């Protein structure tokens, strides 16, 4: 069965300076994501809204396969890659895979080292990891009836207390069900969990 922690242990020995992985991106959110980048870089990246200008993200949405960031030949108006250098993200690579069906979902990863460029064999290995995770992720999610009920009621705009009253359980039990659903879906918020669950036809 698909496990994010298993992915982390596979990727970290290759991408020694950090990585970001987004799996099976739908309309708005990935079904699962794993962020192994340093907190200071993530804070800087978010604070300056760099996702809109990140050449690696653009490459990942426009291409498939693998590329070293130094060889992408993509515009970088906000100097995202030079900024990354300051945070020890000296050498990078991007991997992007696309589902076989028309309109298939995309998964991608951005990987970094401090010491040297990624070797060709490492790029192949990272591509294989992302591709396997892309396929496995689609089969991983299973919500209980109780988790689905709590998620649906919350999605209808009910407050926690109202959900608890509707289900005849405590607010802490509702929180537990919602937290379990978010964890299983790889979501950070209820809105994201609902989006993923709907995309997977779980609710």
Image (cartoon, rainbow, N blue to C red):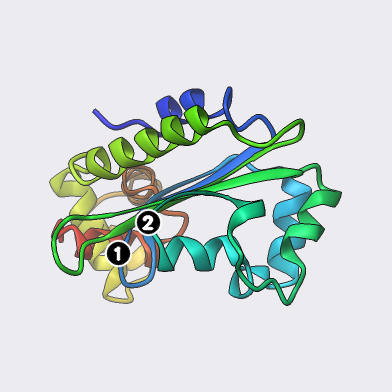
Residue at 38% in and 71% down: 28
Is 55 on the left-hand or right-hand side of 89? left
Return the residue found at the far right: 86
Front in this rendered view, residue 11 or 2: 11
Front in this rendered view, residue 70 or 174: 70
Q: Quick check: can you spot residue 171?
A: no
Q: Nearer the viewer, mark 2 or mark 1?
A: 2
- Number of marks in the image? 2
The residue labelled by disc 2 is 64
Q: Are marks 2 and 1 in contact (CB under 8 Å)?
A: no
Residue at 75% in and 71% down: 48
Q: Badge 1 local density, few (<14 within 10 Å), some, or many (20+)?
A: many
The x and y percentages for residue 119 are 57, 31
Residue at 65% in and 40% down: 112
Q: Badge 2 local density, few (<14 within 10 Å), some, or many (20+)?
A: some
The CA span between labels 2 and 1 is 28 Å
Front in this rendered view, residue 167 or 193: 193
Q: Quick check: can you spot residue 64?
A: yes
- Give the answer, above or below, for where 4 lies relative to 151: above
The x and y percentages for residue 55 are 60, 66
Where disc 2 sits, the SS reads loop
The x and y percentages for residue 95 are 45, 48
Q: Residue 43 lies in what quarter of the image?
A: bottom right
The mark nearer the N terminus, 2 or 1, is: 2
Where disc 1 sits, the SS reads helix
The x and y percentages for residue 1 are 23, 28
The residue labelled by disc 1 is 194
Q: Which mark is residue 170?
A: none
């Amino acid at each position: 069965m698909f496990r994010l922690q298993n992915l982390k242990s596979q990727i970290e020995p290759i991408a020694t300076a950090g990585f970001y992985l987004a799996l099976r991106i739908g309309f708005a959110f990935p079904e699962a994501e794993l962020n192994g980048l340093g907190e200071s870089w993530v804070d800087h990246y978010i604070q300056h809204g760099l996702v809109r200008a990140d050449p690696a993200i653009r490459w990942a949405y426009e291409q498939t396969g693998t590329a070293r960031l130094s060889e992408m030949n993509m515009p970088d108006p906000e100097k995202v890659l030079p900024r990354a250098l300051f945070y020890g993200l000296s050498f990078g690579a991007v991997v992007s895979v696309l589902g076989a069906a028309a309109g298939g979902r995309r998964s991608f990863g951005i990987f970094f080292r401090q010491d040297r460029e990624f070797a060709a064999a490492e790029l192949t290995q990272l591509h294989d990891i992302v591709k396997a995770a892309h396929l496995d992720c689609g089969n991983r999610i299973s919500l209980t009836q109780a988790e689905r009920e709590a998620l649906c009621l919350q999605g209808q705009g009910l407050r926690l207390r109202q959900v608890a009253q509707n289900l005849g359980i405590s607010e802490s039990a509702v929180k537990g069900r919602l937290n379990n659903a978010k964890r299983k879906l790889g979501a950070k918020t209820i809105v994201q969990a609902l989006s993923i669950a709907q995309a997977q036809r779980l609710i």
